[in-house]
Amino acid sequence: DGGITQSPKYLFRKEGQNVTLSCEQNLNHDAMYWYRQDPGQGLRLIYYSHIVNDFQKGDIAEGYSVSREKKESFPLTVTSAQKNPTAFYLCASSLSGQTHSNQPQHFGDGTRLSIL
Amino acid sequence: ELKVEQNPLFLSMQEGKNYTIYCNYSTTSDRLYWYRQDPGKSLESLFVLLSNGAVKQEGRLMASLDTKARLSTLHITAAVHDLSATYFCAVDPRGRGGSEKLVFGKGTKLTVNP
């Protein structure tokens, strides 16, 4: 079955450490996204990518970095510059373009990141 | 800047009752999505609304879109406990194209009591 796989499910970060969250999809989707969810809040967009080797900052990109070297993969690095990284991180993917406007974004199961 | 507001943010209702969740947004768009999230879980797509007057129904849930009023509603009919979850609406600020760069509401946490 096609889907989005995020790993790990739980992650702990020490102060000053960078950590990388994995997101892989086998849906053949062009577009991929990273969101952050804080308790009682909606989702806020961190980064997104519509095509391999290209990505754009979302609303809260500071302290994060991404890469899109393969269509299937969109890893997110939470750097030491992100001072409040504790949150639930969700990766999503979708088909891109107006011909696919009836298709929603599909989400992975998320990674819960905490500070040690 | 697009803002998406849901209300209520918390909703406790009894089984068998009806209720409506509202989603208002601040700029023109004709692309709106509803998602469901169970505690600690991912988001599940419920409805995709793509034009003014669009209405979609699935079981006890019905969603509609009024682009002129910039309002979408999610109506719950004869609620059952299994509907307890957090419901999010999300709007495409460009109003066209794929579901790209969505702006989410804060979510409505629904609890259905026996």
Image: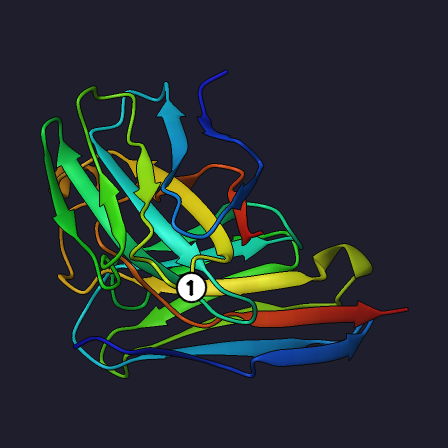
- Residue at 13% x, 54% y is B96
Residue B63 in sight from this viewpoint: yes
Image location of residue B45, percent across then percent down: 47, 47
Image location of residue B60, percent across then percent down: 66, 59
Name the foreground residue: A108 vs A16.
A16
Image location of residue B11, percent across then percent down: 67, 79
* Residue sitting at the far front: A16
Which corner quadrant of the image does residue B42 belong to? top right
Residue occupied by mark 1: A84
Above or below, B37 relative to A9 = below
- Residue at 49% x, 47% y is A14
Above or below, B108 relative to A2 = below
- The count of marks equals 1
Above or below, B32 relative to A11 = below
* Residue sitting at the far right: B114
Name the foreground residue: B13 vs A9.
A9
Name the foreground residue: A9 vs B3.
A9
In the image, is B72 to the left or to the right of B58?
Answer: left
Chain of the residue on which disc 1 is drawn: A
Residue B99 in sight from this viewpoint: no
The amino acid pointed to by label 1 is Asn
In the image, is B98 to the left or to the right of A45?
Answer: left
